[in-house]
Image (tube, rainbow, N blue to C red):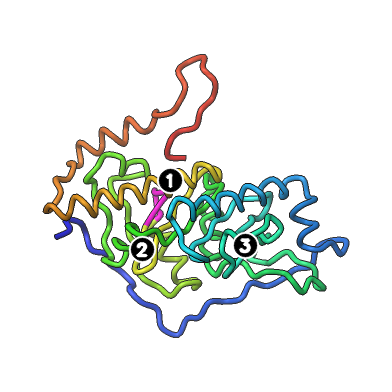
Amino acid sequence: MFQSTPVTGRQDTEGVTPLPCPIIPLKGGANRSQFLMNDAPSAPLATALRAVYREMAARGLNVGASGNVSVRCGDGFLITPSGLPPERCAAADMVALTMAGERVAADADADSLAPSSEWRIHRDIYENTPEAGAVIHAHSPFATALACQRRDIPPFHYMIARFGGDSVRCAAYATFGTAALSTNALAALVRRNACLLANHGMIACGRDLEHALAQAIELETLCEQYWRTCQMGSPVLLSADEMGEVLERFRTYGRPKEGASAATYCIW
């Protein structure tokens, strides 16, 4: 038996379908590949984004074309394309979106790829969380198994604090690609940088792509540990005082001593 709190709130969404992403033409008639590969800020980010998408598959976080990853880029963001598995992705296949949810592509670019169906979650996280520089959504085995139980992950291990609090919440269920799912995810991410999505998978946010990938791997590891310990019975949970002490220590974890080079607080 799991010793955790069941998800409350909205559990399903009727009559809601994923909305298409509008297109805006590039200035000067450039095509999508020229934008991604020649624009100074975008080119290295597109290459790095493809590399992380492939690494997610190599680490077992995703299978086939499931899951997606994005990175903040200027006033918008780049996101992996819909329905294209990582081994078939080129850097030029990454899709550029504005924060208004508009797709950057040339009108005549017939080969333009659609963004991931979950682009709205990524956009809404960036708009509501200025610390987030990259977002990963995965259907990893253990996180997804727990998400299908629609339960939060309680403080069975102190590293739960890495995600910002004394639990990792599970967002209430909504159909993939909908505004309702994004709303539910944002609610689960209040004062957190990761969550589960009921009957779906996980979200992990980071200050950059490397950090987001590390967060996703850590969350999947903890999900596996929680699943395994539950096979032996109800885990012994850390108390509120014990987790409070851990969270206080995490406020300065990774920060340099006086005079040392700058480092980033481990949660963001």
- Mark 2 vs 3, N-terminal side: 3
Q: Give the number of marks.
A: 3
Circle 1 is placed at which residue position?
215
Measured in 3D between alpha carbons, the distance from the residue under mark 2 to the one under mark 3, in whole angstroms, is 31 Å
Which residue is at 55% across, 46% downward? 209
Q: Are marks 2 and 1 in contact (CB under 8 Å)?
A: no
Circle 3 is placed at which residue position?
88
Q: Are marks 2 and 3 in contact (CB under 8 Å)?
A: no
- Mark 3 vs 1, N-terminal side: 3
Q: Nearer the viewer, mark 2 or mark 1?
A: 1
Q: Secondary structure at mark 2?
A: strand
Q: Secondary structure at mark 1?
A: helix
Pick the front one: 227 or 57: 57
Question: Residue 170, image x and y in percent?
Answer: 33, 60
* Residue 46 vertical position relative to residue 1 in the rendered view, above or below: above
Q: For the N terminus, which image quadrant?
A: bottom left
Look at label 2 and name its amino acid.
Answer: Ala
Circle 2 is placed at which residue position?
171
Measured in 3D between alpha carbons, the distance from the residue under mark 3 to the one under mark 1, in whole angstroms, is 25 Å
Residue 144 seen anywhere in this rendered image of the structure:
yes
Q: Which residues are magenta?
A: 189-195
